[in-house]
Image (cartoon, rainbow, N blue to C red):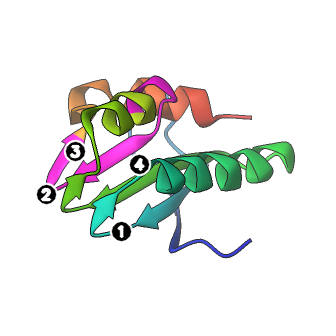
Amino acid sequence: MAADLLWMGTIKKGEYAGEVIVFVGENSWTIGLDDVERAAKKAEILKRAKVWAVPFVGGSGWASSEVREEALERKILCIVDSKVEPSRDNWEQPLAFGKP
């Protein structure tokens, strides 16, 4: 289960302060559906092991608008060309979705 990036930390503030979370990332120059699926699958494996895992994809652009829509529908955090979706104001939805 190799991932491009596993990033673990403790949430510092807000509703989930003090809880440990793992971000599971797949990175590509152009983000494709395979990246979205790999990130989701790897996060799901960790969730089954009772780890709070949030999938994310990162890259310089999307393979298509349909891939972007699929990622957002699946509650995957997206970092594309230095922009984060959903916006930082709406992070609680993907965070809550990743909680086991």
Q: Position of residue 95 (x, y in %)?
A: 50, 34
Q: Is residue 21 above or below residue 89?
A: below
Against 28, residue 19 (above or below) is above
Instruction: Tell me whether the residue at label 3 lies in contact with that at label 2, contact meaning CB atoms closer than 8 angstroms.
Output: no
Q: Which mark is residue 81?
A: 2
Instruction: Name the element at disc 1.
Output: loop
Q: Is residue 87 above or below residue 7?
A: above
Cβ atoms under marks 4 and 1 closer than 8 Å: no
Q: Horizontal and vertical percent for residue 98?
A: 61, 36
Query: Which label is found at residue 10?
Result: none
| The image quarter in which residue 38 lies | bottom right
On the question of residue 80 being in view, the answer is yes
Disc 4: which residue: 12
74 in magenta: yes
Q: Residue at x 23, y 35 (%)?
A: 88
**Pair 3/4: label in front:** 3
Q: Which residue type does callout 1 highlight?
A: Ser
Q: CA distance from mark 1 to mark 2?
A: 11 Å
- 79 within the magenta span: yes
Which mark is on residue 84?
3
* Residue at (76% x, 44% y) in the render: 47
**Alpha carbon of mark 4 to alpha carbon of mark 1: how far?**
29 Å
Q: Would you name the residue on which mark 1 appears?
A: 28
Instruction: Give the SS element for disc 3.
Output: strand
Q: Give the quarter of the figure containing the C terminus.
A: top right
- Badge 4 vs badge 2, beta-carbon distance below 8 Å: no
Q: Nearer the viewer, mark 1 or mark 2?
A: 1
Q: Earlier in the sequence, mark 4 or mark 1?
A: 4
Magenta part of the chain: 72-84
Which callout, 3 or 4, points at the residue further toward the start of the chain? 4
Q: Upstream in the sequence, badge 1 or badge 3?
A: 1
- The type of residue carrying mark 3 is Val
